[in-house]
């Protein structure tokens, strides 16, 4: 599969890009499931966040632009079968750097949640 | 969703104009895709859509635009991306200030104050300066567009197709 490599790939460690914004995190999460075009990313991100995250085209493509530049995602050059293809769309793929950043962010969030759960105030709230 | 639906056609036209507010590099790279996403998510083509749905959609669209515009301009002017030509961003950003300055020179007393003359002569001089500045801004933008092999306002949809 041929992909258009991002020029920014390999410059900064993915861990240094943390923390990720919710929009970026959900975009990476959606792309971890498979390659998607912009509209599919938008729909899936809204669905996964339970409607809490509503991306507009501006926010979505601003995030995509930064992700491409940082090499966390790449544009897929290979097109779907002609009967399924729509030439107006571009498909995006999660790169290895993107996977690393996603994993690191998930770990960071997990650690945050663990710390929050261990606080006295939250424990008391849970038992109340 | 068909592009022939009048509501969708009108909304797409409005959004295409609004896309012109983004920096040229970003607009040229992502404009067609953004327009396509807008068309896909626009409730205009659907039947029995309530007014509040339209209102919510446009509220989201406009707030998204307002939130993302400053960041993109800041990025384009301070740290242009690989696909953006720095001089092009600066030239493009100068067109509006040049036009505003031109307006001040013509309609206000700024022109007269600058050239220390009054009456018709000051007005004519103001007009000349304003026109020169505006034309200069547009020319710089056009020249840089030519050398970066891009087109100004070239966001167009290709032939309509079905949604994926």
Image (cartoon, coloured by chain):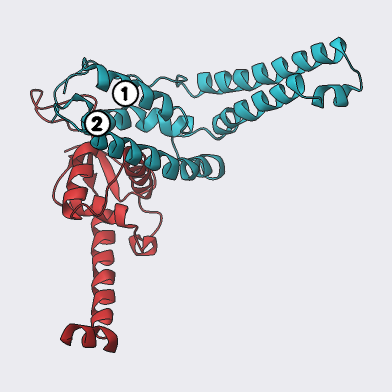
Chain colours: A red, B cyan
Quadrant assignment for the N terminus of chain B: top left
| Residue B121 falls in image quadrant | top right
**Quarter of the view holding residue B59:** top left
Q: How many marks?
A: 2
Task: Answer left or right for A46 relative to B65.
Answer: left
Q: Compared to B86, does A63 lie above or below?
A: below
The reply to whether residue A31 is in sight is: no
Q: Percent x, y for residue B101?
A: 71, 27
Q: Residue at x 42, y 43 (%)?
A: B68
Task: Tell me the residue that label 2 is attached to.
Answer: B42
Chain identifier of the residue bearing label 2 in the image: B
What is the quadrant of the C terminus of chain B in the image? top left
Distance from disc 2 to disc 1, alpha carbons, whole Å, reads 9 Å
At horizontal 28% and vertical 37% (from top left) the residue drawn is B57
- Establish if A69 lies above or below B20: below
Q: Residue at x 23, y 72 (%)?
A: A110
The residue shown at (36%, 39%) is A58
Q: Is residue B109 above or below residue B78?
A: above
Nearer to the camera, A49 or B23: A49
Residue farthest toward the front in the current orientation of the protein: B51
Mark 2 and mark 1 lie on one chain; the one further toward the N terminus is 1
Mark 2 crowd level (few <14, some 14–19, many ≥20, 10 Å Cα): many
Q: Which residue is mark 1?
A: B12
Given residues A98 and B73, the one toward you in this image is B73
Find residue A122 and report its horizontal and vertical position in percent.
25, 83
- Determine whether the residue tagged by mark 2 lies in a helix, strand or loop: loop
């Amino acid at each position: 599969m041929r992909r258009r490599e991002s020029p920014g790939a390999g410059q900064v460690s993915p861990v240094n890009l943390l923390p990720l914004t919710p929009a970026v995190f959900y975009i990476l999460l959606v792309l971890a499931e498979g390659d998607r075009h912009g509209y599919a990313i938008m729909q899936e991100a809204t669905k996964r966040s339970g409607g809490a995250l509503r991306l507009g085209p501006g926010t979505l493509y601003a995030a995509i632009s930064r992700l491409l530049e940082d090499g966390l995602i790449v544009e897929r050059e290979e097109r779907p079968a002609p009967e399924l293809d729509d030439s107006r769309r571009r498909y995006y793929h999660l790169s290895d750097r993107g996977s690393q950043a996603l994993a690191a962010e998930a770990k960071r969030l997990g650690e945050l949640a663990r710390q929050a759960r261990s606080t006295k105030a939250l424990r008391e709230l849970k038992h109340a | 969703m068909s592009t022939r639906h009048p509501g969708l056609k009108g909304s797409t036209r409005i959004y295409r104009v609004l896309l012109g507010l983004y920096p040229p590099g970003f607009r040229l790279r992502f404009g067609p895709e953004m327009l396509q996403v807008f068309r896909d998510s626009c409730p205009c083509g659907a039947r029995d859509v309530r007014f509040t749905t339209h209102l919510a959609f446009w509220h989201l669209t406009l707030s998204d635009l307002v939130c993302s515009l400053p960041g993109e301009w800041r990025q384009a002017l301070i740290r242009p991306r690989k696909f953006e030509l720095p001089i092009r961003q600066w030239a493009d950003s100068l067109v509006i200030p040049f036009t505003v300055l031109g307006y001040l020179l013509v309609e206000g007393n700024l022109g007269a104050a600058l050239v220390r003359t009054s009456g018709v002569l000051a007005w004519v001089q103001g007009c000349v300066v304003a026109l020169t500045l505006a034309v200069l801004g547009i020319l710089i933008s056009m020249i840089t567009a030519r050398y970066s092999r891009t087109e100004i306002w070239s966001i167009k949809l290709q032939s309509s197709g079905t949604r994926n």
